[in-house]
Amino acid sequence: MITIALSKGRIFEETAPLLAAAGIHADEEPGSSRKLILETNRDDVRLIIVRASDVPTYVQYGAADIGIAGKDVLDEHGGTGLYQPLDLQIAKCKMMVAVREGFDYQACISQGARLKVVTKYVKTAREHFAQKGMHVDLIKLYGSMELGPLVGLADAIVDLVSTGGTLRANKLEAVEHIGDISSRLIINQASMKLNREKLQPILGAFSDAVAGAK
Ligand code: ATP
Ligand code: MG
């Protein structure tokens, strides 16, 4: 049995066409089903529906053979035990630093001020500011990072930005680009060796579908 770990929402929507290209169709719609294990048209393939940030964990420990996870999530996880053979070019966005409109971020940097930063991406943020030689106090949040600077919890946020609509709606502006984000196919390293015959065609179909979508 090949188990594929996916998260609901945007990643699933953008993954469904890739699964279809590999001839895999879920028996039920994950959006409406409450089931966490979904059977497919193939007896030897099932899907499990997990939290986006938990996908690498399921694949690392072999509870799933394959997963699809954002680079943001993979950077925080660290990638232990995972192959990352394919950039699926879906769920694209950017990891950015943002501050309140008018807040002089560059002046803070040149004065060596100690910044307070809220983020869900503590590892990514720590590495980014360390590389710049900036001193920051990181505060972990699990969502609605945009609120932090508005209520005095922080000077800046590190978060994903796509259209910038949420930043604008909260009078924040992006001041630094940390990296480009997209979703990646991940495969358990031991499973890739043991199940290569079954996994390789799926990997190949995904790869062709991504190349065809360009
Ligand atoms: P939850 O919403 O359950 O707290 P989550 O926020 O991690 O979890 P999603 O919002 O579905 O889950 O995001 C899943 C992945 O989609 C992220 O890890 C990221 O790679 C990508 N993503 C997040 N926000 C955007 C966006 N605005 N545009 C494009 N891709 C995004
Ligand atoms: Mg979300």
Image (cartoon, rainbow, N blue to C red):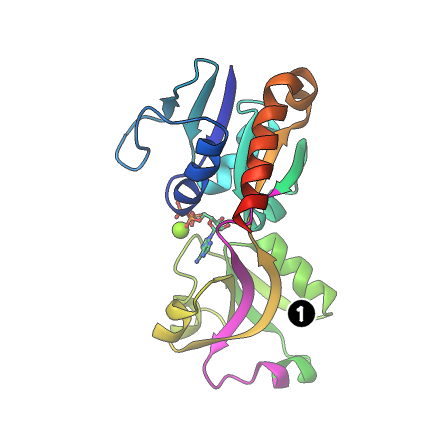
Rendered residue at 64%/21% (across/down)? 191
Side (left or right) of 50 relative to 35: right
Magenta span contains residue 191? no
The answer to whether residue 170 is visible is: no
Measuring from the top left, give residue 142's x and y in whole percent.
43, 52
Q: As shown in the figure, which amino acid type bears the numbered disc 1?
A: His
Residue positioned most to the left: 32
Q: Mark 1 points at which residue?
A: 135
Q: Can residue 141 be seen in this view?
A: yes
Q: Position of residue 105 (x, y in %)?
A: 58, 81
**Per the image, is 102 magenta?**
yes
Quadrant in which residue 202 is drawn? top right
Task: Find the magenta span and give its range.
Answer: 87-107
Q: Position of residue 26 (x, y in %)?
A: 37, 27
Above or below residue 175? Residue 120 is: above
Q: In this view, does 25 lie above or below 171?
A: above
Task: Specify the quadrant of the image occupied by residue 145.
Answer: bottom left
